[in-house]
Amino acid sequence: MPEGPPEPASEDASEDASEDASEDATATEPRPQPHAMVRVIRPNGAVILLGLLCALAVVESIAAFLEYRERLDEHDWDAVGRALAEHTDEPVIVASEWLGPSARMHLAQTRSWDSLAYPDLRSFPRFWLLTHARERPWHAAMRAELEELPRPELLAIHHIGELTLREYHQDVGVERFSLLDSIREVRTARGRCTGSHGQWRCKDGRVALQTVEVDYRPRRCLAVELDDGVMAEVELGEVELGDRIRGHVGFGDFNARLRADPSARLELMIDGAVVGRWVFSDDQGWAAFAIATPPGRHELGLRVGTSVAGTWQRSGHEPSPTDSLCVELRGFDEGGRQP
């Protein structure tokens, strides 16, 4: 029996044949090769990135050196010394942060407590500010030292090489006394503290005249380090009061403050009567206080202490190290000015 005509190929078979032909054609075409730069970077990307960062660091270091390199020489310091020769009793405050070490090496006036660890600018009718020639003296930290005082009167500007020396005058009250120069006796509830020359040992700790870093600035003050809740009673005896007492309280030892969270308590007594009480937390920085006083000679006393001593460590509460409570106060005759 004769066979019929061949059946046409199915659609599926045609598609398979087309795909096979396409694959064969693709297989015969050469794959494009990546650029030579890509072949170099791809396996070494981390190394190249590290090299670029190092190169950038070198460039920045060179730029910083050229910008901030020391341009001062001995002639500049000698000229500043001559300008201050007739003003040895006036403080010279270094208002440029990075200039301080060099200034204290060359100028004796910058090493005094008034120039280095002053409580504020209120005690200085005349003073000097020393800066680099390109810096402004009244930055935020210096403005804070004025507290509520107006900007002092600028008397003169001395441009000396890479240094600028500014002379100021301000109308401030007359200082009558300072706590740091007037302490007669220190005691606690457990008895009189022993010692002299600004160092007192108590049964509950110690009290001393020293320089404490408060809020990242040095302050000359009475440092109190006593047990929990113990108050130091500081007797000044009879002193000459003006019309106002002003003072400051702050805490030193940053690490101890982080692990203790103390508060300061302060009481001021005139002729045996309490005339003022204050409480300060450890995050208030260099906190100021003030109170009006009767002029004349009066018995003055101070009670001061902290709510908690010691620090919290991993093992629990430890009595040491402890925070240092820093206190200073002075009496002024301000002629009726408001605080």
Image (cartoon, rainbow, N blue to C red):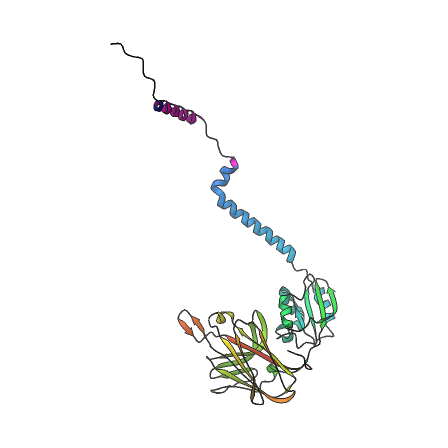
Please name the residue shown 36% across and 23% down the image.
11
Count all numbered tags in the image, as a single digit. Answer: 0
Q: Residue at x 40, y 25 (%)?
A: 24
Is residue 331 found left or right of 261 in the rendered image? right
- Please tell me in which quadrant of the rendered image residue 169 appears: bottom right
Is residue 101 in view from this perspective?
no
In this view, the residue in front, 73 or 225, is 225
Picture layout, residue 205 above or below residue 152: below
> Residue, x 68% and y 67% (percent of image)?
130
Provide residue 83's location: percent of width, then percent of height: 74, 70
Asked whether 141 or 150 is in front, the reply is: 150
Residue 191: give x, y in percent of width and height: 48, 88
- Residue at 52% across, 37% down: 37
> Relative to residue 116, is residue 228 drawn left or right?
left
> Taking 125 as reference, is 55 left or right?
left
Percent position of residue 339, x then y: 64, 78
Q: Is residue 26 magenta?
A: yes
Q: Is residue 29 magenta?
A: yes
Q: What is the chief secondary structure element of the magenta stretch?
A: helix
Specify the segment rendered in magenta. Answer: 13-36
Give how far across and how far down residue 251 sits, in percent.
53, 74
